[in-house]
Amino acid sequence: MKAILRAFKRLLTYLGAILPESFLHSLQMILNYMKLGRWNRARGFSYPLRFAHRAEVFNAVAEKVRDERVLYLEFGVYQGTSMRWWSQALKNPASHLHGFDSFEGLPEAFDDAGGKYARGWFSTGGQIPQIDDPRVKFYKGWFEQTLPGYAFPDHDVLVINIDADLYASTLFVLKTLRPHFKKGTYLYMDDMSRPDHEPRAMQEFIEETGLKFRPLAADVTLNNAFFVCEG
């Protein structure tokens, strides 16, 4: 049996040498989504709302808070698509929408993506999105540079959008924001399909802090997911 297993592993190395990276990436993503399903089940996470599109996931929370005095914090702004959406959705003039990004792309290559998401991917060349909303403000730089000195404005509801992709970046944001998590804080994770990154960071944060989170909504793939902190 061991000889058969060794031969099979040897065959896999030959296949890996000749198959295109795009195919191998697709195989890895299949496994990632299966792991994501297992990750949710192991934590007893069940999503009462599942939608086809990310905007619908956003709206599941936005409709609850649109008239409140919201502090919306976004980590990983890129070209500002999500920030524009929330700028339209949040109606209270006293709300604040603050985005954090280096605008220089990923600080390191992003795991199994076959070289697609190399260091610097998602760069805008340092250009900050232009959004015609005085409530919107951007903090340019790496999270480690901008977030520790950030002064939190007065607010009634905190909505956190993490689209940092990488494990280390995600964990840093969560740990730095720890004093501001309370019952009713909303947490959105944008890229759950890489188990070694955002899910890993979130799980470590939960284990370290003892905070409890309840799933609210996700897209049909569970890649985009909203949670609420229960304290």
Image (cartoon, rainbow, N blue to C red):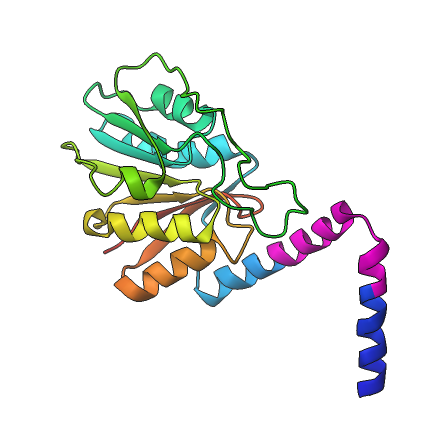
Please say whether residue 180 is visible from this viewpoint.
Answer: yes
Name the spot of residue 103 as percent of width and height, x first: 43, 29
Name the spot of residue 203 as percent of width and height, x first: 40, 61
**Residue shown at the point (84%, 85%) measured from the top left:** 3
The range drawn in magenta is 14-33
Quadrant containing the C terminus is bottom left
2 above or below 94? below
Q: Is 194 on the left or on the right of 9, as rendered?
A: left
Quadrant containing the N terminus is bottom right
Please state which of residues 142 and 160 is positioned toward the viewer in this rendering: 142
Residue extending farthest bottom: 1
**Residue shown at the point (31%, 14%) measured from the top left:** 133
Please state which of residues 85 and 141 is positioned toward the viewer in this rendering: 141
Q: How many marks?
A: 0
Residue 24 colored in magenta in the image: yes
Residue extending farthest top: 132
213 above or below 53? below
Q: Is 69 on the left or on the right of 213, as rendered?
A: left
**Residue shown at the point (40%, 21%) measured from the top left:** 128
Please say whether residue 46 is visible from this viewpoint.
Answer: no
107 above or below 17? above
Residue 51 colored in magenta in the image: no
Q: Is 94 on the left or on the right of 162, as rendered?
A: left
Name the spot of residue 47 as percent of width and height, x first: 46, 51
**Residue shown at the point (85%, 63%) measured from the top left:** 14
Instruction: Specify the quadrant of the image occupied by residue 17.
Output: bottom right
> Magenta-highlighted stretch: main secondary structure?
helix
Name the spot of residue 35 as percent of width and height, x first: 58, 61
